[in-house]
Amino acid sequence: MLRWSSFLARVPRIHSLPRHTRYTTRSGPSSRPDPFVLLAPQLSDLRHSLLSLLDSGHPRLSEITRYYFLHPSKQIRPIIILLFARATNGLGRQWEQKLWEAQHTAAGGRAEELDWPLSRPDVLNDWNPSMPTNTAPFNSPFTLRPLTPHRPPAPKRPTPTTPAPPALYDATYVLPTQTRLAQIVEMMHTASLLHDDVIDESALRRGSPSAPAAFGNKLSILGGNFVLARASGALSRLGDPEVTDLIASVLSNLVEGEILQTKAVETSAGGVQAEGKETHAVRIQHAWNIYLQKTYLKTASLMAKGARAAVTLGGCKEGDIWREIAYAYGRNLGIAFQLVDDILDYDSASATLGKPGGADLQLGLTTGPALYAWEEHPVMGALIQRKFEAPGDVEMARDYVARSSALQRTRELAQSYADKAMEVLQQLPESEAKSALEVLAERVIRRKS
Ligand code: FPP
Ligand code: MG
């Protein structure tokens, strides 16, 4: 059995990272692009064409699966993907191959080919009234079909004489596969929200009735499953097993994160080997480790693995540093994003922005600010232990947080993760997309909703 002393020796004291290691970017704020403005046209196209991926023969199903896309998110996940594509395309060892595939019919990388089924259409869409020509009827036995291929044969790429030296390809070019990945990742995020709003019994999302409030729990769950199914089909058509593996693992991470979140925080001495004064600190450290692990699984994993997958689709393979940069950026940014989210939950002003302040405490969740407040006010441990369930607990917990440096310290911790995200970017060649990624990290910290 792992003893506490050896366990703690292995665990970095992340919540006590130095407070004043601000990372500053080289160029001034005025010269840097706003990622949301820079990508506004692409994000609008992306959202619009995404809706066609959700078509179904059942109007009610189509209605619910489209619902959250009609009240769009901040689209931070697609932004990360599109920016990393722009910031790294041309650098990967297999870039020329990927570009060639995007330009040649039947090579697998052209935009329209990403909609072609990999299996013959009457098998894949075996019941879809909105595709009558591709659907076999059920009122007669199914007969063997002619062995005609349904996709044109793949062309062979001529062997290039001299490979081009690695250099950024074009400031704005994104491969069709990378654009599709941005849609897939947004679909997975939305599917998880359709389920999350059932679990959290949320009445509102983005200022409007949540999907369960508008359609009921059953349709919300089934709608989420349907969005996931369509995203999985689109993922397989990207034709990259490594990317499929990576993005599929995000789904397990989301579920693991959600489960870990429900785990009670260990606030009593039972099972903890340390003695005396140290015990309180040891328990808090343990709770921080679980909280940060949950934060990675639930929030940062999709950003980190999505960014890595985008760079992989651009032809960066094992041994290319660009993929490692993308993953490290997404992971740090994702944790910073969630820490700020957890701060905003204590901000009563956020209630006016369509999100009830204090929702986490109402759900019994202990987040970063509560952990810091517990450190300063040990009596907070009892409230955490009983998941703020006793009358007055929520108000008392908010009061302890307000009377401590918890929110300030959580903000500093978020800043340290955002600084790290900006620092890892410095190895990328200069580009507008790189600057926009820097700005994005700053905006994540400054956001108010
Ligand atoms: C929002 O968190 C929820 C998530 C980021 C992930 C939820 C994951 C699941 C429900 C697991 C199932 C996953 C899939 C893909 C079906 P929040 O409740 O803290 O934020 P909120 O205030 O926006 O609701
Ligand atoms: Mg929720």
Image: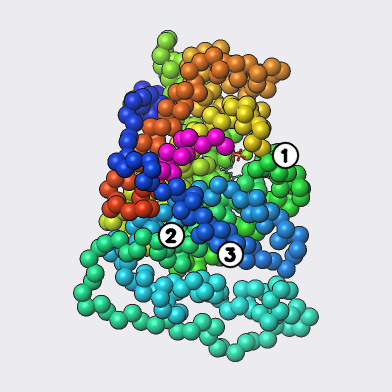
In the rendered image of this protein, does residue 277 appear above or below residue 335? above
Q: Nearer the viewer, mark 1 or mark 2?
A: 1
- Please say which color scheme the image uses: rainbow
Residue tagged 3? 49
Name the residue rendered at 32%, 46% in the picture: 425
Residue, far top: 276
Q: Quadrant of residue 139?
A: bottom right
Residue tagged 1? 203
Specify the quadrant that holds the C terminus. top right
Q: Nearer the viewer, mark 2 or mark 3?
A: 3
Q: Earlier in the sequence, mark 2 or mark 3?
A: 3
Residues in magenta, as a range: 439-449
Instruction: Name the quarter showing ligand 1.
Output: top right
Q: CA distance from mark 1 to mark 3?
A: 28 Å
Specify the quadrant that holds the N terminus. top left
Q: Earlier in the sequence, mark 1 or mark 2?
A: 1
Residue, far front: 30
Q: CA distance from mark 1 to mark 2?
A: 35 Å
- Crowd rating for badge 3 (residues with CA inside 10 Å; few <14, some 14–19, many 20+): few
Q: Amino acid at mark 2?
A: Val
Place of residue 386 in the rendered image (x, y in percent of width and height, measured from the top left):
63, 21
Give whichever of 346, 377 is nearer the camera: 346
- Crowd rating for badge 2 (residues with CA inside 10 Å; few <14, some 14–19, many 20+): many
Place of residue 365 in the rendered image (x, y in percent of width and height, measured from the top left):
59, 29
Is residue 446 one of those drawn in magenta?
yes
Q: CA distance from mark 2 to mark 3?
A: 22 Å
Local SS, label 2: helix
User: Could you tell me if the residues under marks 1 and 2 are in contact, i.e. CB atoms within 8 Å?
Assistant: no
Local SS, label 3: helix
Question: Can the viewer see residue 310?
Answer: yes
